[in-house]
Amino acid sequence: MRSRGVPLAGPDVAAWRARLPAAFGAAPRTRLLRALAAAAFLAWLAWALVHFGVSPQRLWNGLGGLLAILRLMVPPSPGELWLDILQGLAESLAMAFLGTFVAALIAVPLGFLGAGNVVTAVLLRFSIRRLFDGFRGIDQLIWALAYVRAVGLGPLAGVLAIATADIAVLAKLYAEAIENVERRQVEGVAAAGGGWPERLRFGILPQVLPVMLAQALYFFESNTRSAAILGVVGAGGIGLQIAERIRVRHWDEVAFIILLMIAMVAAIDWASARLRRRLIGR
């Protein structure tokens, strides 16, 4: 470094090094900790690969088996029971819609209870948020297995599984949206003499309702794909049709079902994207 053509003296460099040590490179202790962390990560990765039996030979054999299945899928065929396939697709679509609708309705009041600018009691809000975390830790498939044992086989178990798994996630997203609303609109309603119900109805809800609807539409799109998996465990939908055909190795019919699912998800994605743009803009 130079100042007016004169090199900086050694004491000046030492002073800058003392003031800004990070600008001159990491300290030896930091470099040692980074090296130990990298070594620990590599050791864990090697243990995981050995424990899971990952090997080039096994991967190569698996790739060959996958290619053989793909060859059996061409050309796709609806088979003789194509009406059952259409019924399964309709069930999956209905499961996704009903489950998302129920979850969104229940998540709205829970979202208000979990928002810091609505519920000022710290202990109550903390408890509600931790309840959200606990429910989010359980996957839809686990809920589906539980509901199949509780209410029996069929799409009702799938609807309940989707709704139960999505309530906590949507409630957390709704609570975060409520916490980020513009305060001046709420203060304006309060200045006009409005109480808490009026503040929620006219100050907060109009701001977050488009976001809530857009998030519910996104979850509907995602649950359309998830509903296919729930049918594998007996929770209704197209998943049961897929599992039956895989069991008897009718791969051409499996390919036909997959193509129908892709077309259905693409149509829902296109429609929900247009609705989201109308609700919250581009």
Image (spheres, helix red, strand yellow):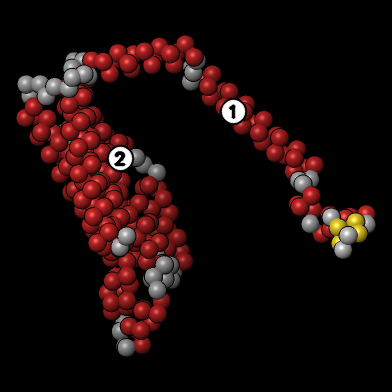
Q: In the image, is 139 to the left or to the right of 275?
A: right
Q: Report the front residue among 113 and 62.
A: 62
Q: Secondary structure at mark 1?
A: helix
Seen at 46% across and 66% down, the residue is 122
Residues under numbered marks 1 and 2 in contact, where contact means CB atoms less than 8 Å apart: no
Q: Report the front residue among 106 and 42.
A: 42
Quadrant in the rendering for residue 248: top left
Q: Report the front residue among 168 and 87.
A: 87
Q: Residues within 10 Å of mark 2 (few under 14, many from 20)?
A: many
How many angstroms separate mark 1 from mark 2 (CA)? 29 Å
Return the x and y of residue 236 as percentages of the image width and height.
17, 35
Marks 1 and 2, the one that precedes in the sequence: 1
Seen at 6% across and 30% down, the residue is 83
Seen at 43% across and 54% down, the residue is 130
- How many numbered badges does the structure rendering display? 2
Q: Secondary structure at mark 2?
A: helix
Quadrant in the rendering for residue 179: bottom left
Q: Is residue 234 visible?
A: no
Return the x and y of residue 28 as percentages of the image width and height.
80, 42
Q: Which residue is mark 1?
A: 44
Looking at the image, residue 227 lies above or below residue 8: above
Seen at 87% across and 63% down, the residue is 4
Q: Residues within 10 Å of mark 1 (few under 14, many from 20)?
A: few
Q: Which residue is mark 2?
A: 140
Q: Is residue 5 visible?
A: yes
Mark 1: amino acid: Trp
Mark 2: amino acid: Gln
Return the x and y of residue 175 as percentages of the image width and height.
37, 62
Looking at the image, residue 72 lies above or below residue 153: above
Q: Nearer the viewer, mark 1 or mark 2?
A: 1
Return the x and y of residue 24 as percentages of the image width and height.
79, 49
